[in-house]
Image (tube, grey):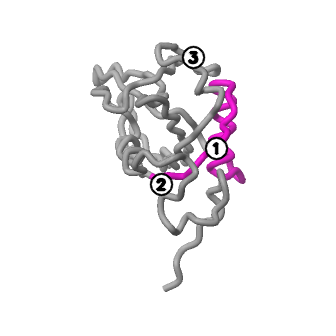
Amino acid sequence: MPSIRNIAIGLPVKDGHVLVSASSDRQRDLDFYRAVGGGIEFGERADEALRREFREELDVALDHVELLGVIENIFEFEGQPGHEYAHVFAVHSDELDDVPLDAELVVLDEGSPVRWAPLDTLVPVFPEGVLEMLRSAGGRPLGTPIRPSLRGAGAGSAGGLRRPHA
């Protein structure tokens, strides 16, 4: 029986572009982009997994990460069902700022191309809704709280969130 995956994905932005991995589904004849990131391991926080994934996949350090939200993603890829909870982060990396917009990187552990895509790209970006989450952050400087409930969570920390008392 398939299982539900928990993943952490990051959205670096530069000059109206977002860094994404290019992929395709041959069964559906669909080219698409996917946010960079990967699985959260047992005992690992989502922000820690994101930093590890960027290091493993692109050999870059993330200087700042900020949780935008969590998306439930139920999908089909290459004819197989998938189900994941994606912790979506706005991220900043001085190393990625140095990567030109016309450059193509490669995911180190699988060889997938990674490139800067315009934020208004017509190519689908998955998980569906991640670009809308980024847009709803409103172009404010990274590190500025999205909602008052995130104040005090600490830079790069997703662990300080608390549910309001009823």
Query: Which mark is drawn over residue 146?
Result: none
Q: SS of the residue at dot 2? A: strand
Instruction: Give the label, 1 or 2, closer to the camera.
Output: 1
Q: Residues within 10 Å of mark 2 (few under 14, many from 20)?
A: some
Q: SS of the residue at dot 1? A: strand
Please give the residue where the numbered disc 2 appears in the rendered image: 69
What residue sits 56% from the left and 44% below the top?
A: 8
Q: Residue furthest right?
A: 43
**Quarter location, residue 117:** top left
**Left or right placement of residue 60 versus residue 75 in this view:** right
Image vertical order of residue 153 relative to residue 113, above or below: below
Q: Residues within 10 Å of mark 3 (few under 14, many from 20)?
A: some
Mark 1 vs mark 2, CA separation in Å? 16 Å
Q: Earlier in the sequence, mark 2 or mark 3?
A: 2
Q: Earlier in the sequence, mark 3 or mark 1?
A: 1
Residue numbers of the magenta segment: 41-70
Please give the residue where the numbered disc 1 appears in the rendered image: 64
What residue sits 34% from the left and 21% below the top?
A: 31
**Quarter location, residue 125:** top left
Q: How many labels sit on residues?
A: 3
Please give the residue where the numbered disc 3 appears in the rendered image: 106
Which amino acid does the dot numbered 1 rest on?
His
Residue 67 lies in the magenta-colored region: yes
Residue 23 lies in the magenta-colored region: no
**Left or right placement of residue 126 versus residue 53 in this view:** left
